[in-house]
């Protein structure tokens, strides 16, 4: 009997849940004059999508003066970050809030439950090595 070689097709990698990094929405409220500084700072953490909107504080002027805040003009920065980087980013922001002159602010994260589209997810999570494999 004669044996024949069988050729196998190359296998594509299968995605596993470990390939996926959950995303969070980081909301940062800072002095309007420092918004660009904080956006640049956040970009150093592989943040690919950010948006800044203008905001106005609601405290009375006498309350602002008592707290040492002269200016009620704020910016709200919305950033999409990976969940595994959230603690590192929040600690970095806390450090900047304490050390940058006029750089006081607040930050909070909100978990995202889903994102539509693999390409969008790859961009937002900065996961360019992500691949889908099939048999």
Image (tube, helix red, strand yellow):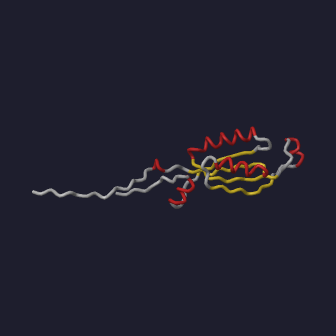
Q: Position of residue 24 (x, y in %)?
A: 60, 50
Q: Is residue 25 left or right of residue 38?
A: left
The residue positioned farthest toward the left in the image shown? 1
Q: Position of residue 66 (x, y in %)?
A: 88, 41
> What residue is rendered at 55% in x and 59% in y?
120
> What residue is rendered at 60% in x and 44% in y?
86
The residue positioned farthest toward the right in the image shown? 62
Instruction: Place residue 55 in its image quadrant.
Output: bottom right
Q: Position of residue 41 (x, y in %)?
A: 68, 47
Frontmost residue, 10 versus 63: 10
> What residue is rendered at 75% in x and 53% in y?
75
Q: Position of residue 39 (x, y in %)?
A: 69, 51
Q: How many marks?
A: 0
Quarter containing the C terminus? bottom left
Quarter containing the N terminus? bottom left
Q: Is residue 51 left or right of residue 32?
A: left
Q: Does 68 appear above or below 35?
A: above
Q: Does 95 appear above or below 130?
A: above
Q: Is residue 123 left or right of residue 75?
A: left
> What residue is rendered at 65% in x and 42% in y?
90
């Amino acid at each position: 009997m004669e044996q024949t070689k069988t050729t196998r097709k190359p296998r594509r990698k299968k995605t596993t849940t470990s390939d996926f990094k959950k995303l969070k929405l980081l909301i940062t409220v800072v002095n309007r004059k420092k918004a660009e500084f904080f956006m640049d700072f956040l970009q150093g953490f592989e943040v690919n999508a950010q948006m800044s909107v203008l905001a106005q504080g609601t405290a009375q002027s006498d309350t602002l003066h008592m707290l040492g805040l002269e200016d009620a003009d704020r910016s709200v920065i919305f950033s999409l970050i990976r969940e595994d980087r959230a603690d590192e980013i929040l600690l970095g922001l806390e450090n900047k809030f304490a050390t940058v002159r006029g750089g006081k602010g607040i930050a909070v994260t909100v978990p995202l439950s889903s994102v539509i589209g693999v390409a969008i997810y790859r961009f937002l999570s900065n996961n360019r090595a992500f691949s889908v494999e099939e048999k």
